[in-house]
Image (cartoon, rainbow, N blue to C red):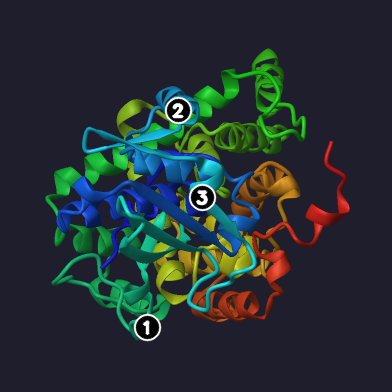
Amino acid sequence: MLSVLDIFRIGIGPSSSHTVGPMRIARRFIRAMTKRGLLPQVERIAAELQGSLALTGVGHGTIDATMLGLAGFAPDRTDPDQAAAALAKIREDMQLTLAGRAIGFDPGRDIDLAGHVIPDLHPNGMVMRAFGAKGQLLLEKTYFSTGGGFVASKAQLMRPPERDLISTGPPAPHPFGSAAELLQLCSEESLTIMDIILANEDAIRPRADTMSGLDRVAQAMGDCIDRGLSQEGVLPGGLKVHRRAPGLWRGLQANPQSNEREQLFDWLNCYAMAVNEENASGGRVVTAPTNGAAGIIPAVMRFYCDADEGDCRDRRRQFLLTAGAIGLLYKQRASISGAEMGCQGEVGVACSMAAGALAALWGGSPHQVACAAEIGMEHNLGLTCDPVGGLVQVPCIERNAIGAVKAVNAARLALHRTEAETCVSLDQVIETMRQTGLDMSSKYKETSQGGLAVNVIEC
């Protein structure tokens, strides 16, 4: 049972599937050992990163994320500076501390990049093992990082798929399993998509807690934009990519009276790139629905929710609830993992979510919201994930800027359509994305083995 607050997770960059997910997996493994009373016996811990986690793990920060998770760091509470200090100490001392006891740990030996192993259940496989003093295996667990910071055990992924129900808590007052069912609920109950989702969230927690959670997400998104607009320099990783958002921001600030419509692209580009430059540097970001696509929703929300504080807060809540509803559909009916779907499952989904949310903000009907979401994805179908150098920089940063602009146009197009004029439904485009992802070659799905990743010379 998923919540919109599961779609929007606060964490650190550069990747939700390769950084946030492995960090959560490592923490989960420590909890499993603690539950079994094994921690006092452990003398060595090893992690095997499989498939995409290994092939782009260095550039995506997976090795560091694994160590941080084992050291007890939680993605949503991690300060990047403290994390950097902890990593430096682990490498210097060649030790990890478990339950107050130090054990030897050599990242080169104890973290295996097994890129040749492509699991059948999901390409982001991670096997955790703990050994005793005599080298005996104490515990072995297989996990998968399934995109957007979500993780699952092997047993969980082997369960039969349950795509017939999307609910945000038992019992949900308005369960739905498709966009068609969601729209039917809106029609029958005379409610907006936000109303439906908010009622379902009420089944999980008090409404005040949901609202404060949404406000935390919006604040984290806004803070990320602000940090990205103030940081200068070259991004880490060796590609020598310069931060461009601060320069764009200064240009916009220098011409405050310029025609807003002419500068629309610049504002959206500036905000989206600020977020993804922060993400590329390992900063604090929000999965929306992933880290690689984290700039689109904050950029559109910042530009179109900038009003007085009270009104802005309500508009942000509406935006996030509507976007979250669309994200839930993609998560349940397809995937938001670049390793499964390519970048259509990340930037494409984020564009779809932002388009639908903006249509709602502009007063669109539930049908027009779904139409905007459909348009946002329809023109991202087949988008590959081919990060140069295994880093979430090229083409990822600019791709978020393009996705933000495309989302706005999708919302505008949808508001000019009636239900009778719609040829493709949101359910149909989600299923098409899923099928396209299954057909797509693995070299175009977050492995850096195809596309720009092999045709651009790293510099």
x and y percent of residue 236 in the render?
Answer: 66, 30
* Mark 1 closeness class: few <14, some 14–19, many ≥20 residues within 10 Å: few
Q: Earlier in the sequence, mark 1 or mark 3?
A: 3
Cα distance, mark 3 to mark 2? 21 Å
> 10 Å neighbourhood of mark 2: few (<14), some, or many (≥20)?
some
Q: Position of residue 159 (x, y in %)?
A: 33, 82
| Pointer 1 residue | 161
Question: Tag 3's secondary structure?
Answer: strand
Q: Secondary structure at mark 1?
A: loop
Q: Residue furthest front?
A: 134
Looking at the image, the residue that sits furthest to the top is 254
Crowding at dot 3, Cα within 10 Å, few <14 / some 14-19 / many 20+, comes out as: many
Q: Amino acid at mark 2?
A: Pro
Give the residue drawn at x 22%, y 72%.
174
* Cα distance between the residues tagged 1 and 2: 37 Å
- Name the one closer to the observer, 179 or 19: 19
Q: Would you identify the image quadrant in which residue 259 lies?
A: top right
- Confirm or deny contact between disc 1 and disc 3 (CB under 8 A): no
> What residue is shown with label 3?
111
Look at the image and tell me in which quarter the C terminus lies.
top right
Q: Is residue 40 left or right of residue 123?
A: left
The mark lying in front, picked from 3 and 2, is 3
Q: Is residue 11 above or below residue 47?
A: above
Residues under numbered marks 1 and 2 in contact, where contact means CB atoms less than 8 Å apart: no
Where disc 2 sits, the SS reads helix
Identify the amino acid type marked 1: Pro
Q: Nearer the viewer, residue 389 or 396?
A: 389
**What residue is pinned by disc 2?**
80
Is 451 placed above or below 158 here? above
C-alpha gap between disc 1 and disc 3: 31 Å
